[in-house]
Image (spheres, grey):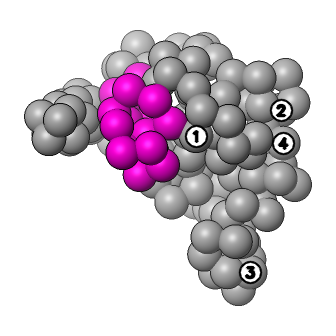
Amino acid sequence: MSKKTNNPEKAKAWAAFSKYKRTLDCIRTTGTPVAGLCITCGDKFHINYLQAGHLIAGRGNAILFNLKFVNAQCRYCNEYHHGKPKVYRAAMVHRHGEAFVDRWETKLRGMAKSAKITDKQINWEQRTKRYKKLTAKLNNIF
């Protein structure tokens, strides 16, 4: 699902990050950069049907670009089921352990509420280039 932003540079960075994370998860779950498993339903989808879903809802910069807690998720789970937060969390606990997930949830929620990272503090063009370069490297492996 495409999120609206008033910052077109941030939107480009998000698109590049999303593509990188989905490609990374496709390779991790199926061994190919073009299809991957949804973190919540476990079904296999083409990369274009997958989205970058978040463990913690929010569009703040502290949460938006977190590689650990953003994972490939099908459109159905992410959009129509609002990310299936309980199932998503259970998958993360299975992967990382309860203590790890608890610690990060507390940290990220705290960051989201307090130390807001403003768009002006981030070089969006540099971030976009970095994620596009990382995605290209992943695709060149195959």
Looking at this view, is 36 or 4 the one in front?
36
**Residue type pointed to by label 1:** Leu
Circle 1 sits on which residue? 37
**Residue type pointed to by label 4:** Lys
Marks 2,4: beta carbons within 8 A:
yes
Could you tell me which secondary element the residue under label 3 belongs to? helix
Marks 2,1: beta carbons within 8 A:
no
Residue 110 falls left or right of residue 47: right
Residue 84, label in figure? 4
Residue 71 image offset from top left, x and y in percent:
56, 46
Could you tell me which secondary element the residue under label 1 belongs to? strand
Q: The magenta stretch spans which residues?
A: 13-36
Q: Is residue 79 above or below residue 115?
A: above
Front tag of 1 and 4? 1
Q: Quadrant of residue 50?
A: top right
Residue 107 falls left or right of residue 61: right
Circle 2 sits on which residue? 82
* Measured Cα–Cα span from mark 1 to mark 4: 15 Å
* Measured Cα–Cα span from mark 2 to mark 3: 22 Å
Q: Residue at x 48, y 49 (%)?
A: 29
- Spot the residue most to the bottom: 99
Could you tell me which secondary element the residue under label 2 belongs to? loop
Residue 98, label in figure? 3
